[in-house]
Image: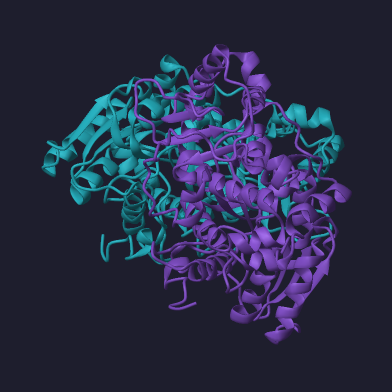
Chain colours: A cyan, B purple
Amino acid sequence: MTDSTVRKTDSTEQSHKAHVLTLPLENAQADREPHSYERWLITKLMRMAGSPPVTFRLWNGELIEPEDQEAQFVLTLTDHKALYSLVANPNLAFGDLYAAGRLTIDGDLPDLMETLYRAVHNARQKWPKWLDALWKNHNPRATGIAEAKENIHHHYDLGNEFYQLWLDQAEMQYTCAYYEQPDLSLEQAQLAKLEHVCRKLRLKPGMTVVEAGCGWGGLARYMARHYGVTVHSYNISREQLTYAEQEAKKQGLDHLITYVEDDYRNIEGQYDAFVSVGMLEHVGKENFEALSELIKRSLKPDGIALLHSIGRNRPMLMNAWIEKRIFPGAYPPSIGEFMEICEHGDFSVLDVENLRLHYAQTLTHWLDRFNASEDEVADMYDAHFTRAWRLYLAGSIAAFRAGSLQLFQVVFTHGDNNQLPRSRADLYQSTAAPEEA
Amino acid sequence: MTDSTVRKTDSTEQSHKAHVLTLPLENAQADREPHSYERWLITKLMRMAGSPPVTFRLWNGELIEPEDQEAQFVLTLTDHKALYSLVANPNLAFGDLYAAGRLTIDGDLPDLMETLYRAVHNARQKWPKWLDALWKNHNPRATGIAEAKENIHHHYDLGNEFYQLWLDQAEMQYTCAYYEQPDLSLEQAQLAKLEHVCRKLRLKPGMTVVEAGCGWGGLARYMARHYGVTVHSYNISREQLTYAEQEAKKQGLDHLITYVEDDYRNIEGQYDAFVSVGMLEHVGKENFEALSELIKRSLKPDGIALLHSIGRNRPMLMNAWIEKRIFPGAYPPSIGEFMEICEHGDFSVLDVENLRLHYAQTLTHWLDRFNASEDEVADMYDAHFTRAWRLYLAGSIAAFRAGSLQLFQVVFTHGDNNQLPRSRADLYQSTAAPEEA
């Protein structure tokens, strides 16, 4: 059995009802028959996970149906050791087993993940303390200057060709888009995001902007192109910067943009705007005070800062598998934690917007394109990598849909700055998205 | 000498330069000559306060000019004991002495207060710890159900006639207005605030709303009148409720509105919206978890909550004089503290807006009207009360201008609610203020 249903069809249109197979597994490893306590363990595991509508299919083809409800998904374990990994550390093992092809899924992957997130979120309140400690415990990696370089290299230096397969063709935005209207294309929504950010910063021609973490440099080019500002953009991913510089040159914007290969902590100078889109997740709470001080000294007296970041409703560690396998060092802060940056710097928060469901939609577009390019991804890397990334994208859709992750844009300024926009009406005077993109 | 300059002219148009008088005080109490260490004490006090451009005029008419700058204001002390009160506890004594007529001011009162706030804010960082402890230390009153009734009675039951003298004539709003355009009248801006709140709540006809702390009931009437919703509004101020009920009846809205004379903690039922404008300041941090649980159980699964409150950039006690003499039990929270409400209830924050300078403008309108009605206020109460309230209004203007106080509107919903507005564009599709009011 494969998870071809997920792979080959558009995940948004697919039937949510799984086709429950009872045939023995193709390609299954030779394995012994399940023990009765293993069946009991699965029942127990499902209860601890809040009894989601999931059928378990064991390595011998045997089915364990959910209690008191019809199954919407089938999870197949290809060997008995997979079960023990799952029970011991479900957060980490679910992803590892899926990536290894030892846990396969019938049914829509984002839907399954959302169902699991919601079920576990509710069930977790009733876990005994020892289980909570066992299952939640992991230590995110450090985010000092040396580690940050490794952490970022791990993810962002996978190769521009890889990201070009499934990110937008407009500005290679690897952050939440802004679906001002529900039917925008990914390209339109990403450009709308850039426009929305520029409007929140109240950019005017001739202003200076510093950007901490610039990805492939799309925001800097958008700001230079549409607002005539001068931008200094910092990034520690060489792969991304090479692309960013080439694009700026190609578009004739290199006189306005300086891409700097350096850690954000080394930002120098004073600017009219400080912006960071999708970097705070990698900063780490232990560096919030330093970031606050950096923004304090980098922002002119009437300057505006905007941080755009994945966040939480309350403090919580990043999912262990995502943190270990996909985004080392990642930690999405709650607004309360975020406020350590603002309070430490005596900043005044002007505006917070939550774009949670916009990220679910962005990721759905990414996953569709990723699935469509799956063979190319497998050629670039291997099937393990492809499955891991599919799960990461699908799981992220689910996390935003289930409310496990949020997307905050926070705008703030120095506490004594009275040069403030009167209202937010100027953000909405015209649509942010271009008609075509 | 009197502070007639402040009283008789429009505070927004008045010259900022004080007319420094060197004549002996009229009506001064017979007092001994100042000692040389008293002069030294004043110089020291001014340094600790960040060297504002203030001349001190002593009880014998003698002037102590500020160092290295021209004075913009003159503070007169009518007796030597006033000086010792001021040095021992400036936060409390400044207001008490002003109210008693023992400290008088030449110059624009809000401007002076803003200058002092800014100077002290910067200087405070360098205070020795003992001074910080001496000057900042006070314990806000408790906010249990019994104390809350007393606290609220102290302020809000002063008499509707009193508040009618200087609040807007439209809906008696004693909270921050929304000056969508700079030249709105107080009435227009207050109605714009009500409209802005309704839009943020995404009210639709037939919905149900619960309001915690309703003042004179204006928001409830606005919601019923313009949005056709059913409202339950809680308040513990009898004076205010009597007015609210009469107005609702007069306007033929009493079939949609129930005003309940009870503590917000006794709210029952489930609603499409939970709203509270200007009550959180009186709730007290120790009650945030209970408030969170209350909102959790009062809000339907897809309901929206909005709290509108004075706040801070970082946790800080309320000014001692305001807390003791004007608003017993008041504590404006920082957003970080505010987030205890949201995190405890697993709420998702959708939107935060800071209307700080709108409150400075609201208060300026209030102060102008208050000053114009000063003789009536003095007839209702006495000169002491009149001076205290003038200082409270002027000091509040200053606190909002100097960034010492903020005004937050926070919109949130249950963490698992996906029935969310796509963007905030709907808040800005038309002006919120009526053309006339």
- The image quadrant where one finds the C terminus of chain A is bottom left
Residue visible at 52% across and 29% down in the picture? A325
On screen, residue B339 above or below B317: below
Foreground residue among A291 and A37: A291
Foreground residue among A372 and B278: B278
Q: Position of residue A29 (x, y in %)?
A: 63, 34
For residue A301, side relative to residue B303 (left or right): left
Figure quadrant of residue B31: top right
Specify whether residue A378 is in view.
Answer: yes
Q: Position of residue A406 (x, y in %)?
A: 55, 46
Foreground residue among B357 and A226: B357
Figure quadrant of residue B332: top right
Residue sticking out furthest to the bottom: B252
Specify whether residue B276 is in view.
Answer: no
For residue A416, side relative to residue B2 (left or right): left
Residue visible at 32% across and 61% down in the picture? A433
Residue visible at 68% across and 33% down in the picture? A82
On screen, residue A255 above or below A171: above
For residue B37, side relative to residue B185 (left or right): right
Q: Position of residue B324 (x, y in %)?
A: 73, 40
Residue sticking out furthest to the right: B146
The mark total stands at: 0
Residue visible at 32% across and 24% down in the picture? A267
Figure quadrant of residue B59: top right
Q: Position of residue B199 (x, y in %)?
A: 54, 68
